[in-house]
Every structure is written in structure tokens, then in C-alpha cells.
Image: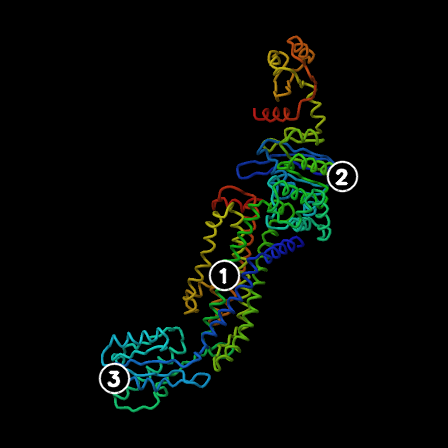
Amino acid sequence: MTGTTDAAVLERVTKRYDSLTAVGDLSLRIRRGALFGLLGPNGAGKTTTLRMLMRILIPDEGSIQVLGEPLNERTQDRIGYLPEERGLYPRMQVRKLLVFLGALKGLAEGEANRRARDWLERLQLADWSEKKVIDLSKGMQQKVQFIAAVIHRPPLLILDEPFTGLDPINAVVVKDIMLELREQGSTIILSTHRMEQVEMMCDSICLINQGQNILHGELQAIKKAYGKNTVRIECSGDGDFLKQMPGLIQSVNHFGAVVEAKLRPGADPQEILKAAVDRGVRIMRFELMEPPLNDIFIERVSDAHA
Amino acid sequence: MRKLWLIVKREYVTRVRTKGFVIATVGVPVFSIGLFAFAIFMATRETDHTLKLVILDSSGGLGARVTQGLNYKLANGQPEFSVVKIVEQPGSDERAREELRSEVSNGQLDGYLLIPGEVAKGGPAEFHTKNPGDFGVNEHIGRAVSDAVIAQRLHDRGLQIENVSEVVQGVELKLVKVTKQGEAEEKGQTFLVALVLAFILYTTLVMYGVSTMRSVLEEKTTRIVEVLLSTAKPFHLMAGKIVGVAAVGLTQYLIWTLTAALLATYGAAMASAFRPGASFPRFHIPASLLAYFVVFFLCGYFLYASLFAAIGASSSNEQDAQQLQWPVMLPIICSMVMFNLVLRDPNSTASVALSLVPFFAPILMTLRLSAQTPPSWQIGLSIALTAVTTVGVVYFSARIYRVGVLMYGKRPSVVELVRWLRYS
């Protein structure tokens, strides 16, 4: 039953290295067509999980299904993978390298060649296609690596920190391609520490910590469960007045120009607005919202450690 | 299989296109041909003019005999030597020598020959010249003096001999190697064939082994290995690398062998054209020896290359790899150290025992095979042991490779390596 609607299903997956359990009893379901955020602090087991999906590592226990089949060579060819640690042959020509990697994923060499040219054109690397990888800047190598992950139009695309090393312009290009691929039906697993990206792009997430799934579901539903318990205020002064209301406010997060305050359960945000006006603070913006993913992340992870 | 082929192809094509490969492949034959031609040129070169000599004779009468002996002719019919004068002097005269020295140095003379009195009792004669490197000239003068001294000695014992060379003509000892196939004249080929085969094995195992190791390490440090592992099996990656490197090596050997074959054919013809009568030993390598060589070559190559690959995979940097490679290099080097031991007595207990040890067998069994055919059971056992060991080593290396390429940081201990073998 899982085969038709899920792009990936992990069932009670465990991976141990000697005494260390990198992933323990992890179950996970990724819907087809999702843009799925895999989150977790450093060392949580994200890379191990992704490597198991790629069949680079074999789980000690549990089962994994990808695109409706247990992992095998065919599933491997239908996944695109951008590892966190980038790697290309430094002394190979860019286009030849892409043709080689495309052919390994099952493309005919002529087809791989044609696609490599198109992609290089699209990512403004056409002039560099006959150069050696080593002659490219880091950002350009990053784009080449991205092409290598998508050249075979994989139904499942795994991207580990795809935006690191990219300038804002290229980051937008890559983001647009990701959304376009999803539009065409690909499922994307995005692993990153950049919460605002997950918040803006992903429709479902999984937060893992110490190899355990501690939060899993549709992003909207998760945020809704927390309710609109946060106010974001842009005002004159440094928002110090918020600290004088411990009865209403649980915690304050300063960002410089904006302040975010988490309300105590049952607190009326109107009271805060009133207090600000009473103290003569000028309010430019006052917004009642769901907690940012960042806060949820920090809260869940520190709860898990407590 | 398609992926394995792609990996082999990439490895082969990128390597064959490097400058290093082109330089080594073209450079070695060009250099060898150059050296060969130079050697032939030097060996067959004759001075094209008559050499003017003075003989300084303190021996009392040998000068005239030596002059008689220097009756060689140049290719153009002119005499090779012309003795300008013989200076008879009882003792050593520094002033006369000084004069001759300056005449040689300003070119009036080509050289002077000093025959001291002790020459009859075995003392040396001296030839002073600006160009002491002309072997033809040196040999002729040496023979003339020798013959003169021998004739003098015989004369002193009462024998009057006209042509000394004929009398003192030595006897050549021909060596004939007896094999199952029959007998073949031996002119040092056995030793040479053994040396060449062992050397090919040794350099291939070390050079291409280390090359495989470096290449694995490079894929690991550049981190491309993770991208590759997401598509191909670790075993295919390792095997593709080893086979690709082997194909590069074979290409190189093929080019070299063809050059050598051309050299042997045309070189011999060329040499005999320069110097009629120059004979080259015929190299006859039996087909069975070649077949065994190929078997041991392949076994040895896969045995060591997979070990080198595992080392590359277990290291995180060049230094670690260099330290780890020693235990693997050691048996190869030991095989070469035992070269003489085995070749001198290929059927001694030590030779037989060593040639059965899988890590030594590729080189040492090839040596024994090239010296004389060992009993079939020994060949069979050696091949069987080596093949089984090779399969086992490839299997374990692949397991270490699989885990190692994803492990970064400090060099693994032996305990850790053993633990890696058990990872699923």
C-alpha cells in the first residue's frame, strides 16, 4: 500500500557504529511530491539517514523502501544526491565529468552530454564546460555538483545543505529549479540548518535528534499545534518593556530591529500592546503569529536533552 | 556491469591522457633506442685516421715486437697505427716523458706507450693519450703488448714463435641448457629473461599498486567517492579502479614490448651491418613460461593492488598512506632480495618453500620457472594457493575499502580495521 503514495518509507531503522547508535529505531514516511525538510542538530544522524536512503550504508535493523520498492540498484539510479561534503574530480573537464556521472546514473552518453550542455547553459556555466573542475570557483563547483544530482531527472532528490557557498543570486536560481522539479513531480528531501529556508520551502518536516524522530509531520499542522503564541514587534527603543511583564511573556528573542516574544499560555497579546502604548513606545509593527520553526527546533531539541 | 565498465573507462581514459603517461610511454622507448644506437655507434666507431704513437721502451727490446703487433688496418685500408719512433731507455726519464706529454697535448702525437722493465714479470704497461675512451684502440694496443710480452717470455725459455696470437688463442666455453624440449645454447639468456620478468613484476606491483592507492585516496579526499557510492557498489568502484590502472599498465607494456621487438629485430640487423660478425643471443621464451607468467602476473597484481586500494581507502592523507603501505611493500621487496638465492638453486628446499608462499609466489615462482621447469605439483600448488589467497584478499580489501572511504580522521588501528570487516 505504501508504494503508491510514498516516495520513501523507513521502518524501525537502526544503524550502529560500534558502541555509538547513529540512528535508532527511526520510522519515517515521505509523501510523493513533498518538499521534505530533514532537520536536526549536528550529529543527529541526518547524514547517516540520507546515506542509508542512498544505499551507501546498510541499516543494521529495519527496512527502507524508496519509490515503492525495497532499496536496490534500480532505486539508487532513481535518486539524485547532493552530499554535504561536495566532491568532484578536480582534474576532469566539467562537461565530461557530468557525462560520466550522468552515465553512471543510467543515461546514454549522448543524452547525458546533451543534458549537461543544457544545464551548464542554464546555470551560466557554458563558458566553463571545457575547463577543468579545479579552475572553477567554489560557487561554480557547487553548481556543477547540483547539476550532477539532477541530470538524470530523479523522481527523488536528496539535497544536503544545497545553498551553502552560493551567493544570493545563485541561491535563488537553485531554489527555483528545486521548485520547478517538484512541480514536475519530483520528491525533494532537503537537509539543512537554515530554518527560514525550510519554513519558506518545505511542506513537511522531520526533526531528528540523537538518531530519534522527535517531530514529524506537515509543517503547517505542526505550527498550528503550537498556536499563535508569538508576537513580533518592531518599535522604538530596544523593547526592554517586554521584560517587565513576566506574567505575560515566557521568553524574548532580540534580533536587533525586531523583537519576538513568546507568550505564556492564556496571555492576551492585547495587554502587551497596551503596556507599550502606556510606556510611550512607538509601535511600527505588531504581529501575532505562529512560532518560528527555529524556536520549535530549539525547544524540541532542548526538551529532548532535558 | 555497465557501471563497472564506465568506471574502468574513465580511469583508463583520464590516465592515458595525462602528460606523465605520454612522457613515460614515449620517453622510455625513445631513450632506450637512443642509448642502444649510441652504444652501437660507440662500439663500432673506428678512428678514421692513423694514430701516431711513440713507444718509450725500458724493457730492452719489446718495443719492436709491439710495433710488429700493431699491424691493424682501418676500414679505408690505411694502417691504424703508425709508430713514429721507439725510444729505448734503460730507466725512467722524466724529461723524455715531459716532452712526449706536450707533443700529445698539442696534437703532434696521438699518444705514447710506456713499456717498463717489470712488464715481463707481470707489471702493467701504460698508454698515455688524450682519448682513453676508444675501446677498439685500447684493445688493439693491449693485445699487441700482451702478445709481445708472451712471445718474449717464450723466447726466453727457448721457444721461437712467429705468430703468438695463434698459440695463445683461448677456448670458449659454450653453455647448453638442457630442458624437456631439448637443448638450447645458453648465452646468459636464462639469467636475463629471469631478471626481466622479475623486474616487470616488481615494478608493476609497486608502481601500479601505489598508483591505485593514490587514486583511491584522491577520490576519498576530494569526497567524490560519496557521489560515486550513491550510484555504484563499493566493490565495483574498487575493481574498476584496479582494472583501469591495470589496463593503463598493459597499454604501456604493449607499446614497450613492440618497441623492444622492433629493436631486437632491426637492432641486430643494424649492429651486424655496422660490424659484421657481431652476434646477438637469441631470446627464446617458451610459451609455457609466458602463460605461467601471465597467470602469476594477474594473481600478483590483483592481490597487491587490492591491498593498496584498501590502504588508500583507510588513510585520510598521503602521510598515513605512506606509513601503511610498508607492510604491503615488504613482501614484494623481499621477493627481489631473494632473487639470487632462488635463481642459483631453484630446487633447494628454501626456494621451493618460498615459491609456495602466496605473497612471494608471483615473483619467485616466475624465477624458478624461468630457470628450470619445477615439478608440476609445485606449480599447481603455488598457483592454487596464490589464487585462493588473492580471492580472499580482494574480498577483505573490498570490505575495508567500503567502510574506509567514508571514514575521515585519524589513521585506523589494526583492531579498527578488523572491526570494519565485520560491519554489515
Task: Give the residue at x 71% y 53%.
Answer: A109
Q: Amino acid at mark 1?
A: Thr
- In depth, the one of B10 and B175 nearer the eye is B10
Q: Residue at x 58, y 25 (%)?
A: A302
Relative to residue A220, is residue B120 depicted above or below? below
Q: Pointer 2: residues within 10 angstroms few (<14), some, or many (20+)? A: some
- Quarter occupied by residue B79: bottom left
Q: Are marks 3 and 1 in contact (CB under 8 Å)?
A: no
Is label 2 or label 3 in front? 3
| Circle number at residue B60 | 3
Label 3, label 1: how far apart the Cα atoms are: 59 Å
* Quarter occupied by the C terminus of chain B: top right
Question: Looking at the figure, which quarter contains the N terminus of chain B?
Answer: bottom right
- Are marks 3 and 1 in one subunit? yes
Q: Which residue is mark 1?
A: B203
Chain for disc number 2: A
Callout 2 touching callout 1 (CB < 8 Å): no
Mark 3 and mark 1 lie on one chain; the one further toward the N terminus is 3
Q: Which residue is mark 2?
A: A185
Quarter occupied by residue A138: top right
On the question of residue A125 being in view, the answer is: yes
Judge whether B208 appears above or below A194 on screen.
below
Tag 1 subunit: B
Judged from the image, the secondary structure of the residue bearing numbered disc 1 is helix
Q: Position of residue B169 (x, y in %)?
A: 37, 85
Q: Amino acid at mark 2?
A: Gly
Q: Are marks 2 and 3 in contact (CB under 8 Å)?
A: no
